[in-house]
Image (cartoon, rainbow, N blue to C red):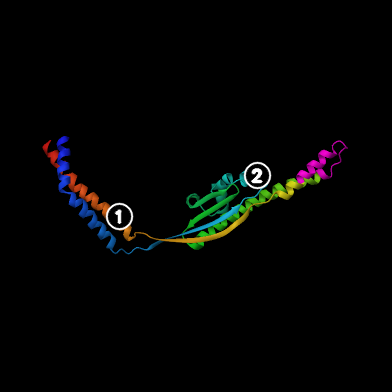
Amino acid sequence: MEHLINTLKKRAIKTIPLFIIIPLLLGGLGYFWQVEAKPLVTYEAKARIELGYYEDLNLNEADTAKSLLTNHDFLSVLFDDYDNNDLNSLKRDIEVKTPSDTKLEIRYSGESEEDSRTTLSQIVEGFLEYDLSKYEARMEVLEDNYEELRGEDVDQVSKVDKQRFVYELQNQLLTIYPAQLADPVTVNDHTEEEFSPIKRAVLGAMVGVTVAFGFLVIPVLFREEDNL
């Protein structure tokens, strides 16, 4: 082993110029090599939702509400013509962030501007419609309770309690609200060259280092094997 290490050290000293010349040469060739490469264009649509408030922990808190937007069952209803593979692919392209406890930022990356805008709009509208149905159901329950309690006959002892409950229901009816679209759907396109000159230069330099290292090590290893 010591003999092998010493041999490698001696050979490394002799091949130092190769470790400089070959990576620089291949890196330079990579940089100046003309490659017909089409720019890579990605389209990202985004929107923001301000969550509602009507005492529904699943929809009124950002951390729990965001899971609905990538839920398989929820998406399968919105995109009923998608099979499982399409839905899984769709979920991978959806990103949901929570800028605050009451806000959702939804992003979707599609193949075109129209695809990105249409798909995200469908997701956002589906969420808002679902949220509105839950809000209206809650509102209906509160209104029924309010009307029933207001028309209820009570004795003098219970009158104060009734007034308090009526007041609380009135406050709830005035303070609850559904989710709203805070920022409408917009689409940004990002253009990136698939294989830029710098990337080609880095790749060429890496190949050069690999070639030089192989030139250093392989002959020594084969020579050692012959001596065994």
* Disc 2 from disc 1: Cα separation: 53 Å
Looking at the figure, which quarter contains the C terminus? top left
Q: What amino acid is found at the position of numbered circle 1 in the picture?
A: Val
192 sits left or right of 226 in the view: right
> Label 2: few (<14), some or many (≥20) within 10 Å?
some
SS at badge 1 = helix
Q: Which of 63/17 is in front?
A: 17
Q: Residue at x 26, y 57 (%)?
A: 27
Going by the image, does 199 lie left or right of 104? left
Magenta span has 154? yes
Counting from the top left corner in percent of width and height, residue 90 is at 49, 52
Rendered location of residue 207, percent (x, y): 25, 52
Q: What's the residue at 76%, 43% (across, down)?
A: 168
* Residue 181 percent coordinates (x, y): 61, 56
Residue placed under numbered mark 1 in the picture: 202
Q: Magenta part of the protein: which range?
A: 149-169
Main SS, magenta region, reads helix
Decide whether residue 179 is among the magenta residues.
no
Q: Is residue 69 visible?
A: no
Q: Residues within 10 Å of mark 1 (few under 14, many from 20)?
A: some
Q: Which residue is mark 2?
A: 56
How many numbered marks, from 0 up? 2
Residue 26 appears in the picture as rendered:
yes
Label 2's element? loop
Quadrant location, the N terminus? top left
- Seen at 32% across and 60% down, the residue is 197
Q: Which-is-in-front pick, marks 2 and 1?
A: 1
Is 116 displayed left or right of 38 in the figure? Answer: right
